[in-house]
Amino acid sequence: MKQTAVIGAGVMGETLLSGLVRAGRRVDQLLVGEKREARAAELEERYGVAVVSNVDAAAKADTVALVVKPQDMVDVLREIAPVLRPGQLLVSLAAGITTELIESHVPEGVAVVRVMPNTPALVDQGMSAISAGSHCDEAHLAEAEALMASVGKVVLVPEKQQDAVTAISGSGPAYIFFVVESMIEAGVHLGLPRTTATDLAVQTLVGSAAMLRETGEHPTVLREQVTSPAGTTAAALRELENHRVRAAFLAALQAARDRSRELASGS
């Protein structure tokens, strides 16, 4: 019976754990590495999983998901490295941490997959990009994909693209929330009750996202369908262009990509 361990029981760690349970993983096939006694008791009660030390989790599992902060990764790797073995799979969800760095701290032959998830995984609508390390085979990649598919959609990308992925989807929810927040504030400024403005903005976002996914149309086509000549939408879009919103988004995403590169280099 193959075992999967989740080391790191913060928000994303629990999100992955709960997604695996909902996806049909048996709880006796799941382990959690968690040092805090109160948190361990909470997870045991909530999911019925065994919560053990990081070392025990790594020693017993065939697949180990490392859901720890980037600054804690090296310490965790040093802790569990003595019990890791060739052929075992490590799946890292730590932003900016390269497969090369992880491989340099674990025994030769341990397979590593790097993942960039995002927070909509909390509602099983995540977007995860996975990249293979130097010792991964197709089975390792398939297992990593199945792991992350429990909380959303998965795409395979070359590792050199992970910084761009971080900028688009990893940080992306914050941009969307920022836009919705701005729409709500504009609605209030225009005289709407805040609850009404919130309902309008959120459902507009949900409906627009559904149109993008279900129609398969390019966003430009969908935007043009809403934009009548000399109409209200055209007036609004003209203001956005005058304020160089498109250019600001490009600059913002480039800044996020560059920061991801700095984190990878330890800056």
Image: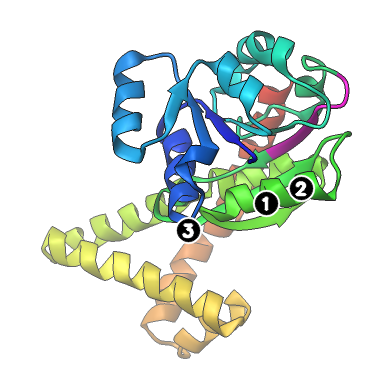
The magenta segment: 108-114
Quadrant showing the N terminus? top right
Q: Is residue 220 above or below residue 2?
A: below
Q: What residue appears at the point 74 percent right and 37 percent down from the top-left corner?
A: 113
Q: Secondary structure at mark 2?
A: helix
Give residue 254's position: percent from left, percent from top.
67, 42
Label 2 Cα neighbours within 10 Å, binned few <14 / some 14-19 / many ≥20 = many
Q: Is residue 74 above or below residue 152?
A: above
Residue furthest to the front in view is 1
Q: Tell me the residue that label 2 is attached to.
A: 141
Give residue 116's position: percent from left, percent from top.
63, 42
Q: Quarter-wise, where is residue 194 in the image?
A: bottom left
Q: Earlier in the sequence, mark 1 or mark 3?
A: 3
Q: What residue appears at the point 39 percent right and 51 percent down from the top-left corner?
A: 177
Q: CA distance from mark 3 to mark 2?
A: 20 Å
Front in this rendered view, residue 38 or 197: 38
Q: Quarter-wise, where is residue 62 in the image?
A: top right
The reply to whether discs 1 and 2 touch (Cβ–Cβ < 8 Å) is yes
29 with respect to 90 (left or right): left
Q: What residue appears at the point 45 percent right and 85 percent down from the top-left corner?
A: 226
Q: Secondary structure at mark 1?
A: helix
Snapshot colouring: rainbow
- The amino acid sitting under disc 3 is Gln
Mark closer to the observer (3, 2): 2
Quadrant showing the C terminus? top right
- The amino acid sitting under disc 2 is Leu
Front in this rendered view, residue 225 or 58: 58
Q: Tell me the residue that label 1 is attached to.
A: 145
Q: CA distance from mark 1 to mark 3?
A: 15 Å
Q: Tell me the residue that label 3 is attached to.
A: 125
Q: Secondary structure at mark 3?
A: loop
Give residue 93's position: percent from left, percent from top.
61, 34
